[in-house]
Image (cartoon, rainbow, N blue to C red):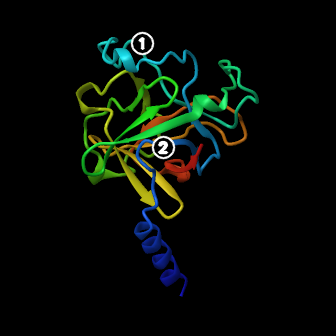
Amino acid sequence: MSLLLLLFVLAEAAYAGYGPVPGQTYLLKDTGTGKYLVLMGEQEDIRHKRGAEHSYKNPVRNFTVVSGFKPGGRMGDDEVPTKDQGLFIFRKLDGDNWYIEHANTGRYMLAPDTVDIRNRRCQDQGWLEASGTRAADMDYYGLATYKVRVWANGLYLEHARSGRYVIATGEKEKPGPFTAVNADCNYYYRALWKFIEA
């Protein structure tokens, strides 16, 4: 009976169009740790100069996860961000491909991984060797394209090229910031994100 109910819930969610609305702004909260995805540091809007950095390698800016936000409207520091530093816009491309854009800066989420791991999920046995989820000023080599995989109670941010999931790292009890990484598996439910309309 419970399996039938689960299937009904999944089918109903898919039918109802559960998922991010293109152009809408969301917070992303990890279900495994309860932490929010954010971009710390400089918040300059780079949309008017896409590609000016010529690479995602220098400077390296990684998205991080934190347990909460600094109250008020003033910009956060290197320890505690303000809520606006955790806002993302989902930009629909073709098919099920998306850009996930940081609302303040216009930077795209990017994974520097090129090897497709979909046929060998969970073989890494952890995320310690996983690459950091980058904040890039443009879509270098198609590495900023993601597939948004909707699940009953959240979504997976799956890198289109490699199949890796964006996951939260760090200890649940500590506030962070901890680096978000591109892992081959949904370790401890850390790859499943709730998207919260802002």
**Residue 99, horizontal then vertical, whole percent:** 36, 37
Q: Answer left or right for 28 relative to 83.
A: left
Residue occupying image coordinates x 42% and y 63%: 17
| Local SS, label 1 | loop
The mark closer to the camera, 2 or 1, is 2
* Residue 191 circle label: none
Q: Earlier in the sequence, mark 2 or mark 1?
A: 2
Where is residue 16 drawn, in percent x and y? Answer: 45, 67
For the residue labelled by badge 2, is the local secondary structure a helix, a strand or a loop? loop
Residue 24, numbered circle: 2
Point out which mark residue 59 bears. Answer: 1
* Residue 177 coordinates in the image, percent (x, y): 63, 28
Tell me, yes or no, whether the two marked residues, 2 and 1, touch with CB atoms within 8 Å: no
Looking at the picture, how far across and down is residue 180, in whole percent?
51, 34
Q: Quadrant of residue 146?
A: top left
Picture quadrant where residue 160 is located: top left
Q: Residue at x 26, y 34 (%)?
A: 114
